[in-house]
Amino acid sequence: MVLWSEMEVCYDLVRYDGRFYCSMTGSYPLHYAASEGYDDVITVLLEKGANVMAWNNNGRTAVHQAAMHGHARSIVTLVAGGAVVRTLDHKGCLALEYAIKNKHVTAVKLLCQFGSEPLLQDWSWVSQRDLKKKKAEYEMAKILQHQIRLIPGYRHTGIIFDVARVTPEEGPILHLEQTGVEVKVVEGQEPYYLYLCQTEEAYGSPPTLGPDEETFGHLLECQTWGPRVQTITLIVTVDRVLRQNEEIVLRPAITSGGVEMQEDENVGITKVTITVPLVPTGITYFTMASREKKQVFKISEEAVVLKPESEPEAEIDIPAGTFDSGELSIKFVVPTDGPDEADDQDKKDQSKPKGEPVLMTSILDLSTTDGQMPKHDIQMKMPVTVADKSEAVVVLTTSNPDPNLEQWDWDEIPAEIDGAGKAVFTINHFSIFSGTSKPKLDANPEGVKDTVRNTFLKMRRVEFLVALKTPEMDESKTDMIITCGTKRKTKLVKKKYDSNYTWFNVGSDDNLKNVPEGQTFQIVIRGNLKEGSDDENMKLIFKSGDQESSRALEIVSTCPDPRELSGEVEIIKETKTRVPTDDKETVEQIDDGLFSCFSRSKSIKVTKAKSEVWEINTCTLCTIPFSTTLTKREPEPEPAEVAQNVIATRQTTSAPLPKKVTWDRLKDAVSHLSADESKQLGFQLGLNGSQMQKVEEDTMDEVDLAMNVIKRWHLLLAKNDMVSQLKGALEAIGRRDLIHKVTKE
């Protein structure tokens, strides 16, 4: 019997290309290197072509061995080399379960970080009365509780991550397969391991954004192992084109690093190059945020003509004596006809002006940092953006642009278009200003004013949808998808999900709501069920008309013998309003003097600034009812012996194959599997030891073993989403190359 338990022996095996040597236990050198935590040996074995998914006689991979002994760094090395953390051994145990059994908290946290579902055989340790007194168990319980909330995100691409080895030998750019992010590799830098994760806001904790900022893309997480990496440069692709006068910033704000942008309007994407400083240990959290460019000018008593960079053709002519010294903030909001404007429902909206664009200029937002108003009139010139410059123009302005008010009070300012194609007008206060078509304003004043308001607030007409996955047999739980977006975007979202999902809404007319980009909604679910992770603070964030805004979760029945899952989803809009208060308040304080024990105290009055007071307002936007039927599998006794031809006959009476799958394609896919791979596939599909033994006994020819495994699984354990089951099982045995063969092209 050969045992590899010493590092020197492992190195000898590497030196003499012993990556394929196998002990009597079915273990390979990679198993022993992982058991001992020999990361350098693991790296060399993988470089020489060792199978990272190889399993021993117990069905355990090297990841199982590393988790069992708590070697977190070895887990990183293996996953970067292509290992899968959700592979089951022949007892049906994940690597996560062995890490928990041996109280390796760091390994548990890392396996969850790499997407392992907490599918444990033994949960009894969680119910211990004195769990809080046991530090390791309590910490692991908190990790698993958090992971349960994230699992729907991993399943439905709300959380995507890569783990990779970064080395200069591979070239100046490393392309990450899952996230699509590109990493700039520094020449001469020592190799290191990188974890990069893109997370939807619903599953993470976004950093604090400014009042005019919204998340651009995903929340990002980054962690490295190995030589200290102080900064990292990433090229991130976002499925949205930046609007004119829009810029990208990093949040939290950083003192070093930077942001560069490159747009491709033809394919509707923006590539953002960001340089981010990393924390010395642990995960660095950050995100990109978009905002309108705001330019601040120093002003004084002198006359000046300002020409903002964001709108170079605009002119602000300030006469002498208009201001004391201060700062003038200028921001332009460029009107855009978003994709949602072309929706059929919007075409039916009679309140929206038709024909040529309503807005003839950008919307200008003017303010001073100290609240000064001009002492003299200021002449404004703003370029007209429409083709027909002969149409009469009028400027709309409002003094109360509060996003929480449904309607604003507007004033009209006369304007003319000069020979240079600019709208010329005069102002005597600061607020927002928009050049609009006078004929359209006269014909439909409320519609035009609403258009200006909605454009300034970046409002979109969105609908809310709820999707339920058809529950599996004998299950009292299922997946739910809640999404919001423009009608064009929700149509694309629906195409992502197959016929196993049923969609619910509140009707085409009532379901369309005007909401601003970046709006956060509370989600409340009622019925004979609950959200699987007991998350009481569920949120949904509407990003923009170009980006998907969805939240996936699991719902579980609360009835002892349920026949259906039914209830409703309430969408609640939350807004925050600043409560008007005096800028200062006078309070009474006690002055004890410098030596209070020898002098008598006296009362004095002190004036100090008040803190800001915000009021939270909520209102229900819509309530979406839903229901789905639960089914139970009819018990069917198995005969003492089932011949191969009987299995083949009975498979026709079980659940039909999905439309994308045929028996011929399945046979072609699994024909490439060896006997050992066929057995391992059976365990990944959920067959237990006795069931697998029965399949082997009923198989006359080894070449038929894989297909008999498939037939037995299809007869006993196949679920509605068979394709996902098959793909997951093939990935778990390291045969991603066969996944494309399972379904039709």
Image (cartoon, rainbow, N blue to C red):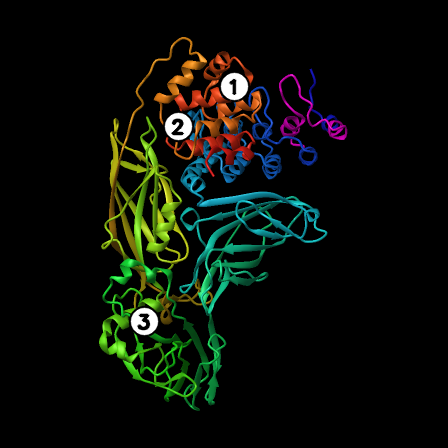
- Near mark 2 (Cα within 10 A), the count class, few <14, some 14-19 or many ≥20, is few
Q: Which amino acid does label 3 sit on?
A: Val
Q: Nearer the viewer, mark 3 or mark 2?
A: 3
Element under disc 3:
helix
The residue to which callout 1 is attached is 705
Q: What whole-number distance in Å separates the C-alpha atoms at marks 3 and 2?
A: 58 Å
Label placed on residue 88: none
Question: Could you classify mark 1 by the number of other residues whose Cα lies within 10 Å: few (under 14), some (14-19), or many (20 or more)?
Answer: many
Check disc 2 and report its element: helix, strand or loop.
helix
Can residue 326 be seen?
A: yes
Q: How many marks?
A: 3
Q: In which quarter of the image is the N terminus?
A: top right
Q: What amino acid type is highlighted by mark number 1?
A: Leu
Percent coordinates x, y for residue 612 in the rendering? 36, 65
Does 408 appear above or below 661? below
**In magenta segment, residue 22:** yes
Amino acid carrying mark 2 in the image: Ser
> Which label number is shown at residue 127?
2
Q: Does the magenta stretch include residue 111?
A: no
- Lower sequence index among marks 1 and 3: 3
Query: Which residue lies most toward the bottom here?
Result: 320
Q: In whole angstroms, how far apart are the C-alphas of marks 2 and 1?
A: 41 Å
Q: What stretch is highlighted in magenta?
A: 11-38
